[in-house]
Image (cartoon, rainbow, N blue to C red):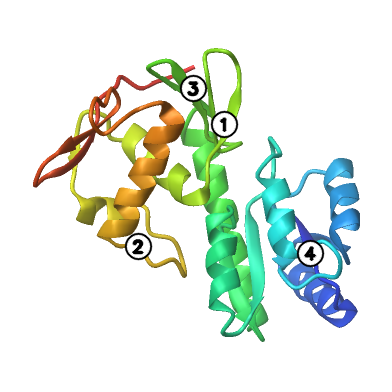
Amino acid sequence: MHCLVVDDDAEIRSSLVSYLQGFGWRVSTAADGQAMRRQLAAARFDALVLDLMLPGEDGLALLRWLQTQAEAPPVLMLTARGDTTSRIVGLELGADDYLPKPFEPRELVARLQALVRRATKGSADDARLLRFGRWRLDRLARQLISEDEVGIALSAAEYRLLAAFVQRPGRVLSREQLIELTRAPGVEVNDRSIDLAVSRLRAKLGDTAREPSLIRTLRGEGYLFDAEVSPC
């Protein structure tokens, strides 16, 4: 397994290289966003450790850029302890997990291994492209593709919600079920956030609450994804 560590602290980079290599990982490093892009262009990585506090282009900007890439590896972001806002924004921008500094290196290894297992399972068991209605969903790039081949980016919350729907078409999902299905580490999810995510997702799908064609509201019960879903 090959990991890219992006951190401007040379001591942290060096210690993670030594520690991860002890668990059989190949490790490359980058001190900033420019070096990160060069590494990603030159090799394929199974995971990426990204510090949010970087000089110049910070980790949040790099997460936005990674979401536009077709084959970005799963991201474990490093945050300052107590930096709740950056942590939540990072997860919303597509980070797969987070670890506050200072951290226990063994926990970092365990979290990276879990990320790789999830990514490997998804690629083996699920088609990358799913079709429903006049849309396709690219699960690797996390974007919608229209009939005109126009890509529409999804936020992390929108993607988790749509993933829950396409895996359970024709089933009524209560808000409580959707909270559990879309929960992510460090992200507070409640009825209101589910309703907001549904509203934003409907807007991107060209759906409306008044005349829904895909996401139907069943008063007192929840939401239903009314479409046939198939791999393509």
Q: On residue 189, which mark appears?
A: 2
Q: Earlier in the sequence, mark 4 or mark 3?
A: 4
**Callout 1: 10 Å neighbours few (<14), some, many (20+)?**
some
Q: Which residue is mark 1?
A: 152
- Establish if 224 lies above or below 11: above
**Callout 3: 10 Å neighbours few (<14), some, many (20+)?**
many
* Residue 173 in the image, given as x and y percentages of width and height: 20, 43
**What residue do we see at 60% from left, 70% from top?**
86
- Residue type at mark 2: give it: Val
- Residue type at mark 1: give it: Ile
**What residue do we see at 60% from left, 27% from top?**
151
Q: Which residue is mark 3?
A: 136
Q: Earlier in the sequence, mark 1 or mark 4?
A: 4
**Callout 2: 10 Å neighbours few (<14), some, many (20+)?**
some
Q: On residue 48, which mark appears?
A: none
74 sits to left or right of 55: left
- Of 198 and 106, nearer the camera is 198
Q: CA distance from mark 4 to mark 3?
A: 33 Å
- Residue type at mark 4: give it: Val
Q: Which residue is mark 4?
A: 5
